[in-house]
Structure formats: structure tokens, C-alpha cells
Amino acid sequence: MRNEDDQPEAERPAAAAPGEAETAQTRRAMLRIGALGTAAVVTVRPGIAHAAVSALTCQIPVPQSTQPNKWIKNNGDVVNPNTGNSYPPPSQPLSGEDVKNSLKYGTNYPGYTSQQTNAYNNYIKKLTMGKQGYTCYASLQSPSRQ
Amino acid sequence: MHGFDVRVGPISYRIGSAWAAPIAVLRRLYAGYPAPADGIATVTARIGPPRPWRRWIRPQVAIEGDHNLPDTVPMAFGHALLAIEMAMNMQVALGECRHLLIHASAVERGGKALIMPGDSGSGKSTLAALLAERGWRLLADEFVMIDLATGRLIPFPRAISLKNSAIAEAEARVADPARFGPHLSATPKGELRHLRPNAEAIARMDEPAEPALILFPSYGFEPASDGVSRSELFMRLTEGSTNYIALGEPAFDHVLRIVETIPAARFAYPDTDSGIAIVEQFCAEAGL
Amino acid sequence: MTTPTYRTDFPQHCRTHPIDGMTLVFHRPSGATHFLDSPLPQMLALLAAKPMDAARLTTSLCATLGLPEDAEARAVVEARLTDLAGIGLVEVG
């Protein structure tokens, strides 16, 4: 009953009575709130258009989101924390604009040292198809966008 | 540079090639199409050698134009027609800003349009090509254009790109051999042959249609059909749109309107005849 | 270290539309389109009413949905807040 004001009327299944709909919704919420692995946000990303339009607005996570608590070595490898010549990863994904400027003009990422920037860039250069950030990195390299 | 200007629906092309032969093939394929209005082409698509010497030594073709993508690879010279077609597609895919583009084929009957989105190999082109030989009008083979002002479907009847087994099926059903382009074998997309839409599709290319039904075909499976939820429909239409993001909020409005007002379903079919029968049954139920 | 406070002006600057039990959002500032599944719309509604930190939001959300508040709920809320911040629908600060 308490989430009644949170949801527009039309969000409930049209066929069900309000009471039933609410129960179903709460049950679904229960299932979902416990499921960390399930995406609750799905963003519409048309393949070709996204790459073409968002080259400078896209982001590159360093490292992959499936690699929490890992550091980046100066050669770009993903390593355990405190490995020699390695650095903590950036706290936020790097923006396409910053990556482009860093790769092209050698600028440091805001708030990071030149050694860290260098390690992150080496990581980005090793990205392969299918890795998070690859499409972004690839679209930055399009000649028409440099 | 050899050139050819042609208008297909709202798009007026200026096509250029470093070689004469591909342009001659293209002229035959697009015989009967109008020239650009007032002679002004709005979209340039070119093919040329990726390196100057490639023009003569083991020639390869690369795609050029107003808009470029990073991942395009040079193709064998024998596939120059495919390269031109891809260049024509890419310029529209990346440059079009008056119409929402949806990756789909479409045919019309009685002013109402059937839209068939689908991945490569779903059979959307084959079904559209064959429906267009039996009482339907071909509106589009690859890109469905939705007018952002009216929500209507603007015809874009490019040459139909037939692949693999679809080639023989079309050859068996289209009497006029002059409507076919050359056989292109072992292309990156497999065997390929282009088919010029029939005279009616070309003559009526400026006549819009009202979107009325969306069907997602899947070729190669036992007959089955199923509804498509509104959210899945939204996702699939936008995923297949090359300019949804670029158009912004008006595109959101139009996709939402389509999703909320137009019935949609998916179906599987084992062969073209049963596919056509299933489509006709859906259309009869939806009043097309 | 202070606990971050999350705030949102959702659904300002957005077009929203209910669809199949989810909320479809067109976010004008980014031009992006998102499907938000439960419990994100509820979280946004709570944050729009009052900015708060993850702990308070967990308490409010669990109360709203009639769920027990436990460590897992807190972890999920924190992960979802990161998602929402990532797409620009909530602000951290």
C-alpha cells in the first residue's frame, strides 16, 4: 500500500485489480532488490549510431567493472594492489574526451599523476573487442573525429 | 572520377567511382529511377582505391563520403557494386536527420505499411522482395524512414540486396532478368545479387504510407508466432536505428508512438512460401 | 570521510513513460534513453522528496516496499545509486 504514490497508475498491469497489482509489484521488487547481478538500468545503445555520435561522450572504465580492487601496472596490465610499478585505478571511468586529449596531447587525467595517466593509457591501448570501453576507444580513433 | 546521380525517395545521391565499370553496372541497376530534383544531389557516396597504387595493382575499393566509420575495410574490386551500395547506405545511416531510420524492410497495401525489422539472415529482404511481386508495393529493403513531422513512412526503395538462397527464389519469381544486378560471389556477406524494385515501387516512391503492423521474421525454423512486448519493441526498434541518438527527443516521441499504437509480433518460418502465408494471415487479422 | 548525500530532481529534465512495469526515461541533458526497473523509480521518488545518504535511503526504501532492511539491501541500494549517478539521474555531493 505504501508505494502507491510512487508509481503512475498505468505502470500496473492493466488486467489486474489494484490490490493484486500492488502485491505483484512488491513481490517483483523483493525479487529484484535482492538480485545484485541483475541490471536495473538498461540504456538504449544503438550500435553504429552510438559509436558515431558519442565518441567524445563515451566512457572507458579502468579496469573492467568485473575487476574490483585491482591496480594498473605501468605497462597496462591489471594486477593485484601494491604490485611493483602499479597504481590504484581511477575512481571514475575516464571520459572519451579526456582519453582523446591524453593520447593525442599527452595531458594527464584530472587528479592523476603522469605515471598513473601513462599506466591507464597503456591499459586502454590493450583493450580488445568485447571489453568494456573498446567501442569508445575505437570510435576515438576514427580519423574524422580527431 | 566517374559519376552517376540518382534519386531514391527523399535522398538524392551523387555517386562517384575511380573506375568506370562499377558506375556502368549501377546505371543499369538503377535504370528508370529519377534524377535529383533540379539536378542537386544532397548525399555524396564514393568508392576509390585505399592507396593510390591500388587503382592498378590488385585493385581494392574503399568507401568514402561525407561520413566515415573507423572499421570499414577495403574490398576486392570485383565487389565494387557492393562497396557502392554500402557507401550509399552508410551516408544515409550516418547523415540522415529529417527522418528516423529503422533497420527494416517494408511493404504497403491500401496505404498501410507492414514493417519487418530483422537481423541479417532473418529473411526480411526476401519476404519484402517477394511480397512486392504479389500485390504489395515495396517501400524499403534496408532502411525504413519515419517522417519526423507526420509519423508516416517515407518510401526509400533502393535496389534489394538478395543473399545466398534468396537469389534463386527471386530469380524463379521475377520474370524480367534486366532487373537483376551481376552475381557477386564470396563477398563478406556471402553470395549477393541486387534486384531492382518493380516499376510501381519506383513510380510511387514519393507516396508515403501509414505504419500499421510490425512483424519480426526469423527464417529457418518451424512455423511459430508470438507477441512482442512494448518494451522489447522499443528496444529492438531503437537498437536497429542508426540515427535515434542523434535525433534526440523527437525520435523518442516517434518510437514511443509506434510502440504504443502499432501491433507487433514475431514469427518463425521454415521456407519462403510458408513465410508469405504467415505474413498474409497476420495482415488479414490486422486489416492490411 | 563524510558519507555522500544523493539528490535528484527527477523527473525534471526527463520524459517518462510507464512500460511493461518499468519506467522508460528520456533524459534531456544526456540525450540518453533508459529503462528503469524496480526499485530505481522508487529510489528516485524518495530522493526527489528529500536528499539523503545511502543508509537513510535504504531504510526509507525498505519501509516503502515493506522489505526487511539488511546488509544485502544496503549493498543493492549502493550499487543502484552508482548506476543512477553513472547515467546522471542522481547527483552525489
Image (cartoon, coloured by chain):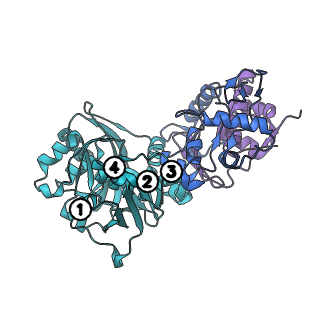
Chain colours: A blue, B cyan, C purple
Disc 2 crowd rating (10 Å Cα; few below 14, some 14-19, many 20+) is many
First in sequence, mark 2 or 1: give its number.
1
Mark 4–mark 2 Cα distance, whole angstroms, equals: 51 Å
Q: Nearer the viewer, mark 4 or mark 1?
A: 4
- Kindly identify the residue that appears in the image at 72 percent across and 46 percent down: A106
Chain letter of mark 3 equals A
Q: Are marks 4 and 2 on the same chain?
A: yes
Q: On the image, numbered disc 2 is attached to which residue? A: B258
Mark 3–mark 2 Cα distance, whole angstroms, equals: 20 Å
Q: Nearer the viewer, mark 3 or mark 1?
A: 1
Chain letter of mark 4 equals B
Mark 4–mark 1 Cα distance, whole angstroms, equals: 21 Å
Image location of residue B36, percent across then percent down: 33, 73
Q: On the image, numbered disc 3 is attached to which residue? A: A49
Is disc 3 in contact with disc 1, using a CB cutoff of under 8 Å?
Answer: no
Mark 3–mark 1 Cα distance, whole angstroms, equals: 32 Å
Q: Nearer the viewer, mark 2 or mark 1?
A: 1
Local SS, label 1: helix
Q: Please indicate whether residue B49 sits to the left or right of residue B136 in the image.
A: right
Q: Please indicate whether residue A56 sits to the left or right of residue B282 in the image.
A: right
